[in-house]
Image: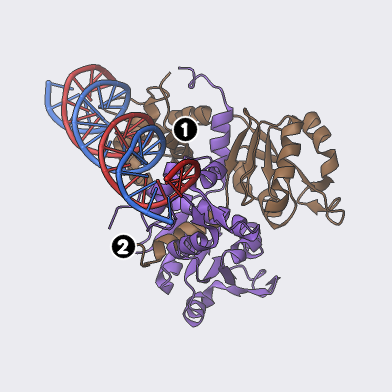
Chain colours: A brown, B purple, C red, D blue
Amino acid sequence: MNKIPKTVSRRLGLYHRCLKNLTSSGKRNVSSKELAEKLGIKSSQVRKDLSYFGAFGKRGVGYDTNYLLEMVERILGVNKSWSVVIIGAGNLGHALANYDVLEKNGFYIVGIFDNDPEKIGQKIGNLTIKDIKEFREFVKKNNVEIAVIAVPATSAQEVADIIVESGIKGIINFSPMTINVPKGIIIEEIDISIPFKNLTFKLTGNEFRSA
Amino acid sequence: MNKIPKTVSRRLGLYHRCLKNLTSSGKRNVSSKELAEKLGIKSSQVRKDLSYFGAFGKRGVGYDTNYLLEMVERILGVNKSWSVVIIGAGNLGHALANYDVLEKNGFYIVGIFDNDPEKIGQKIGNLTIKDIKEFREFVKKNNVEIAVIAVPATSAQEVADIIVESGIKGIINFSPMTINVPKGIIIEEIDISIPFKNLTFKLTGNEFRSA
DNA sequence: TAGATTGTTAATCGATTAACAATC
DNA sequence: TAGATTGTTAATCGATTAACAATC
C-alpha cells in the first residue's frame, strides 16, 4: 500500500465535483490535461493522484468520464448515501439542514438537535428539532454515521462528548474551537472565520510583508 | 523578504483564535510549546512560522500573550475592521449575516443582496435585503472591501463578474463552483461539501485503500 | 548563575513536477 | 502506423522538524 499524501484527499473532492459537472453536461471523455486546467493544477498531478488508487485511463485516449466519476465516488466513499445529524439549531444548523448541495452528494440530514426548549419541537423543512436528550437513542435507531457540530464554541466540547458517546465515528466541527476526541474518531474542522482571515492576510500589505 | 509557505496563512488564523482565547482567559505569557500542543503541531513549527514576520518572544521566557496577539492581528490584517457584503439571501447568506463569530473578528456585514423580488425588502437582523442592481452604487458609497458569494453554483460566475466590476478586491466563494476572476482579485473558496467528502474518504475502508 | 526558551540553521521529510517509456 | 495520452520514475521543490547557540 502506497502512502497517500494528505493533500490528495482535498483534491479528490474537487475531481469529484468537476467530474459530476462534466458527466451531467454530457462529456464522455476527459484527459488529465483538461481536468488539470479546470482545477488550476498540473496534469501530472492529476495522473499521480489517481495512480494511488489504480489505473483508470486509456493511454492515448484519456479517461471515460462516467467510469472515472464512479471510481472517484468509490474512493471517496460517496457511492453510498450517509446519514447525518446536526447538533445546534441556530443559524448555521438551520442553513446546513436546508443546504441542497449536501443531499446532492449523498449526505442526508436525518435529524437536528438542540437543548433550547424554545426551539425543540419547531420545524426546519420536514425535520422537527429534537431534544438533545434523545440523541443517543435516535442515533442507534437510525444508524447515524456522521454528526455535525453547529453550536457555539463554548458548548462544542460538551457536544463532542455526547457524539462520541453515541458511537458515531465521524464529526464535522463548524465551531471555532478545537475539540478533543478519542483515537478512532475522525474530525473535520471548518471554522468559517479562517478563510476570512486568510483573505485579509492576502489583501493586507503590511510592514511584516515587506520586512 | 523571506518567502512565506502557503501553509503558514492557515496556521496564523489558528494562532489568532488560540491567542484570543488565551488573552480573554487572562493568560499573560505563553511558550511555543504550549501553543503547539493546543494546535497539535510541533513547537519548532510555531517558532518558525512566527519568525517569518519578526522576533516576538523573549528567550527563556516565551511570548507576551497580549503582544503576540496584537502582532498576529497586524500580520493577518484583522487589527482593523472590514466591510463585507453578502450576495445571495438564501439559507447560507442568511446564516452568514447572523453569524456572530465574523463580527467578533472584525468582519462587519454591511449589506446583503439578492435578485429575487420576493426577498428584496425583507429584513435579516437589522439589514434589509437589497436588489442586486443597487450593488455597485452601494459598494462605492460604503467602501465595501469584501464580498461573499452565497448563491447557487449556476449563478456564481455571474455574481463574481458583478463583484469584480464593482471594484472589490477580495471574494469569499461559498458556492461549489470554481469561478474565474482577473489577476489582482483574491478569492478564498469554501465548498462546504468538501470536508464532508474528506470525512467519508477517511471513514471508508474500501478496496482502493488496501491496494 | 542555572534553567528555560527563543530564533535560526541545517537536515529531513513529503509533495509536486518534468520527463518518458508504455501503449491505446 | 502516427499521434496522443497515460502511468510511473526520478528530479526538483517546498515544508517540517531537530538541534543548538543565543540570550532572557
Neighbour tally class for label 2: few under 14, some 14-19, many 20 plus, Cα within 10 Å: few
Image coordinates of residue B77 in percent, x first then y, are 46, 65
- Picture quadrant of residue A46: top left
Q: Nearer the viewer, residue A116 or B40?
A: B40
Eyeballing the image, is B41 above or below B138? above
Image point (41%, 73%), residue name = B167
Say whether residue A78 is visible: no
- Expressed as whole percent of the image width and height from the top left, the position of residue B108 reads 58, 70
Judge left or right: residue B187 versus residue A118.
left
Badge 1: few (under 14), some or many (20 or more) residues near its Cα, within 10 Å? many
Q: Amino acid at mark 1?
A: Leu
Q: Secondary structure at mark 1?
A: helix
Mark 2 lies on residue: A211
Q: Which mark is residue A69?
A: 1
**Residue A29 at x, y = what percent?**
37, 34
Q: Position of residue A94 (x, y in %)?
A: 71, 53
Q: CA distance from mark 2 to mark 1?
A: 46 Å
Q: Is residue B202 visible?
A: yes
Which residue corresponds to the image point at 42% horizontal and 42% vertical from the top-left?
Answer: B44
Q: Is residue A63 above or below residue A148?
A: above
